[in-house]
């Protein structure tokens, strides 16, 4: 057997490898719809054969035709590498560029069996959030990264490595785009077609940008959301309060851990037994039941004892909501994290069908399955409405729940507005994003937990220092962050790479990153650190039903901010940058981007982090300020006071009543 390094350097083999074994315990993607015409299937196979020598085409063509028939996509399973895929220490990667080695580490973390939702199909989370479309792309990308120098840039087109191009040391080592369609060809139906043809992919957010750090990636944000939801509702803590939701698969797996950290009684439904058991075995889910009567008795006991506990329900979420609505059972908070950006291809499993029946029906009869999904959403919304009438605070978690419920004909509208807010609209936007707080993250490339512990202590010290001089309006955010980072190690958040998530503002990100860089230079941290963030951030995403839901000047439907951020990060020092169509709320509904920045203790790293991190946050604050969000106005004014080179256009506030009077007079 070839060593890990040899297999990486080999790339796509000239010979035909043996078909690898499949572990039946690994979660598999559902069969995709048979959407291509016979002529289009020929084109899909021709496209796939571009990676292979002509003398092998007859063999591969038959195999790919069979994959299309059996799975609805060409994954090239036979090329799955023999080496285990996980985030190795950076120095184990066969690379000429240390920056490239860091990217290899991040790619492998996204496909780690302990991390990825459907690793055999190269899907990290969200049901269809892909790193690559097929295993040939993985092999070729890793080979290019191993070979590249600091004077080259790898260009990635929706998972396909277009090639290495001459550049320079200050250029990004990798530039990624995923799903960038001509606007009129960006419908969900056309996505299925072009993805099956092998010419585009849904990169979600951090899947296709190599920045996923397991469900920890949204645990902090989910914790902040839960705590602030109850603060909005009653001003109290979550002790003895019940939170009902669904989803334990990819990102949604964070809900169980966040419920416990926030001090709530979390009840989380999950229909896929492999997904639920994975979170239970990882310690993220405290306990689970498949009997609703037993579950609710346990939850009531936890409420009375004010336990912080996560209780899984192995079953359909609609059954859970309807049972709770029927009984005199109090639910304080409610949400949903099914992957409704992908409602008809495995993102949502309707009531009335088993998990297996749904997987079979969605491929065999998509129209009938769609009707099941929409009927299920109508029932789910009806139950949620009953509980909301009894005092429950419900919010959309940016997964297109409100949007797809509306499309299904559910009773989800209040006039022209949704009955319930997006969590960004009421919580994340005005409390975090407008002030520059967002999901900053880092990965210790040594793979050593001791390095991660040191970074936690460094970040803790920075926040403590910031609290001594911070404005009153961000004191609560910093106090919440201090509690988070102080308890991070105790909460056992690591799944995969030695990574950490921390909501931080521009000043916090720059100060923490500089302190990390200094510690690497002194030898206190043993290897480079990768800095990044979720695309779900202050500046990274334009999404009218999520990240920009609290922008009301009409620009929430534009995408200038995300594109400007991608471009600006690229020439300010990012190691890699990415821009995606889709992510969170779905294909055609959002444009989002991200970055990775490798710091190694050098003065050059300090120059890059100061320039890039300042822009990466303040771009979004300036846009939110121009939208007249007062928190953002105050924040960008403070930024201009600290940085004389920053000059941002500040809006004058018009008198709306006077304008309305003028319009009425004209009419």
Image (cartoon, rainbow, N blue to C red):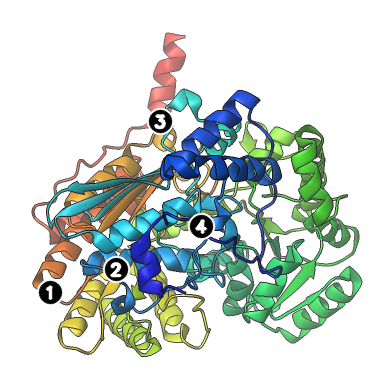
Which disc is residue 602 wearing? Answer: 1
User: Where residue 520 sits in the image (x, y, percent)?
Assistant: 20, 82
The Cα atoms of the two marked residues, 2 and 1, are separated by 17 Å
The Cα atoms of the two marked residues, 1 and 3, are separated by 52 Å
Nearer mark to the viewer, of 2 and 1: 2
The numbered mark, 2 or 3, whose residue comes first in the sequence reads: 2
Residue linked to disc 4 = 79
Please name the residue shown 70% across and 47% down the image.
Answer: 31
Q: Is residue 505 left or right of residue 251?
A: left
The Cα atoms of the two marked residues, 2 and 4, are separated by 22 Å
Q: Nearer the viewer, residue 148 or 487?
A: 148
- Visible in this render: residue 125? no
Q: Is residue 4 above or below residue 392?
A: below
Q: Is residue 408 above or below residue 577?
A: above
Nearer mark to the viewer, of 1 and 3: 1
Residue linked to disc 3 = 656
The Cα atoms of the two marked residues, 2 and 3, are separated by 55 Å
The Cα atoms of the two marked residues, 3 and 4, are separated by 62 Å
Residue linked to disc 2 = 101
The numbered mark, 1 or 4, whose residue comes first in the sequence reads: 4
The numbered mark, 2 or 1, whose residue comes first in the sequence reads: 2
- Visible in this render: residue 65? yes
Res 460 quadrant in image: bottom left
Q: Could you tell me which secondary element the residue under label 3 belongs to?
A: helix
Q: Is residue 251 left or right of residue 412?
A: left
Please name the residue shown 31% across and 37% down the image.
Answer: 653
């Amino acid at each position: 057997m070839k060593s890990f390094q040899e297999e990486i350097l080999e790339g796509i083999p000239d010979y035909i490898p043996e078909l690898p074994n499949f572990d039946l315990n690994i979660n598999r993607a559902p069969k995709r719809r048979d959407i291509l015409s016979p002529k289009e299937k020929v084109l899909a196979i021709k496209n796939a054969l571009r990676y292979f020598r002509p003398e092998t085409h007859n063999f591969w063509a038959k195999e790919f035709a069979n994959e299309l028939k059996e799975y609805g996509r060409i994954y090239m399973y036979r090329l799955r590498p023999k080496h285990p895929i996980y985030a190795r220490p950076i120095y184990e990667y066969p690379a000429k560029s240390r920056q490239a080695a860091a990217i290899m580490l991040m790619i492998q973390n996204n496909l780690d069996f302990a991390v990825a939702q459907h690793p055999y199909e190269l899907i990290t989370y969200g049901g269809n959030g892909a790193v690559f479309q097929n295993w040939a792309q993985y092999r070729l990308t890793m080979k290019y990264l191993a070979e590249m120098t600091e004077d080259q840039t790898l260009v990635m087109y929706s998972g396909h490595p277009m090639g290495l191009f001459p550049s320079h040391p200050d250029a990004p080592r990798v530039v990624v785009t995923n799903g960038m369609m001509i606007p009129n060809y960006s419908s969900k139906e056309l996505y299925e077609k072009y993805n099956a043809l092998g010419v585009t992919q849904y990169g979600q957010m951090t899947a296709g940008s190599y920045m996923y750090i397991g469900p920890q990636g949204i645990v902090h944000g989910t914790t902040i959301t839960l705590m602030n939801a109850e603060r909005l509702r009653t001003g109290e803590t979550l002790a003895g309060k019940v939170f009902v939701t669904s989803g334990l698969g990819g990102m949604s797996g964070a809900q169980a851990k966040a419920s416990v950290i926030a001090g709530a009684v979390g009840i989380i439904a999950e229909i896929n037994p492999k997904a639920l058991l994975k979170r239970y075995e990882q310690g993220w889910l405290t306990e689970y039941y498949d009997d609703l009567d037993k579950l609710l008795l346990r939850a009531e006991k936890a409420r009375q004892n004010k336990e912080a506990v996560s209780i899984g329900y192995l079953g359909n979420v609609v059954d859970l909501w309807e049972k709770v609505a029927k009984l005199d059972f109090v639910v304080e908070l409610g949400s949903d994290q099914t992957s409704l950006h992908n409602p008809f291809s495995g993102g949502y499993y309707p009531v009335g069908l088993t998990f297996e029946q749904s997987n079979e029906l969605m491929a065999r009869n998509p129209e009938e399955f769609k009707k099941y999904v929409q009927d299920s959403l109508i029932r789910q919304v009806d139950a949620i409405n009953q509980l909301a009438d009894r005092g429950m605070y419900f919010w959309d978690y940016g997964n297109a729940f409100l949007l797809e419920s509306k499309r299904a004909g559910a009773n989800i509208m209040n006039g022209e507005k949704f009955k319930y807010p997006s969590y960004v609209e009421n919580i994340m936007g005005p409390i975090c994003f407008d002030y520059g707080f967002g999901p900053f993250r880092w990965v210790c490339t040594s793979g050593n937990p001791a390095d991660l512990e040191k970074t936690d202590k460094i970040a803790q010290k920075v926040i403590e220092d910031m609290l001594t001089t911070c404005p009153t309006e961000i004191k609560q955010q910093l106090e919440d962050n201090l509690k988070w980072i102080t308890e991070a190690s105790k909460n056992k958040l690591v799944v995969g790479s030695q990574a950490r998530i921390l909501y931080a503002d521009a000043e916090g990100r720059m100060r923490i990153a500089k302190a990390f860089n200094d510690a690497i230079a002194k030898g206190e941290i043993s290897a480079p650190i990768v800095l990044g963030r979720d695309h779900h951030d202050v500046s990274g995403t334009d999404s009218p039903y999520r990240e920009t839901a609290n922008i009301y000047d009409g620009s929430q439907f534009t995408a200038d901010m995300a594109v400007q951020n991608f471009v600006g990060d690229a020439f300010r020092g990012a190691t890699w940058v990415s821009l995606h169509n889709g992510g969170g709320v779905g294909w055609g509904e959002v444009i989002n981007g991200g970055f990775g920045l490798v710091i190694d203790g050098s003065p050059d790293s300090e120059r890059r982090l100061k320039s890039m991190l300042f822009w990466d946050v303040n771009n979004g604050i300036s846009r939110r300020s121009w939208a007249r969000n007062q928190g953002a106005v105050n924040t960008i004014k403070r930024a201009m006071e600290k940085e004389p080179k920053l000059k941002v256009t500040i809006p004058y506030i018009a008198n709306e009543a006077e304008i309305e009077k003028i319009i009425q007079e004209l009419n």
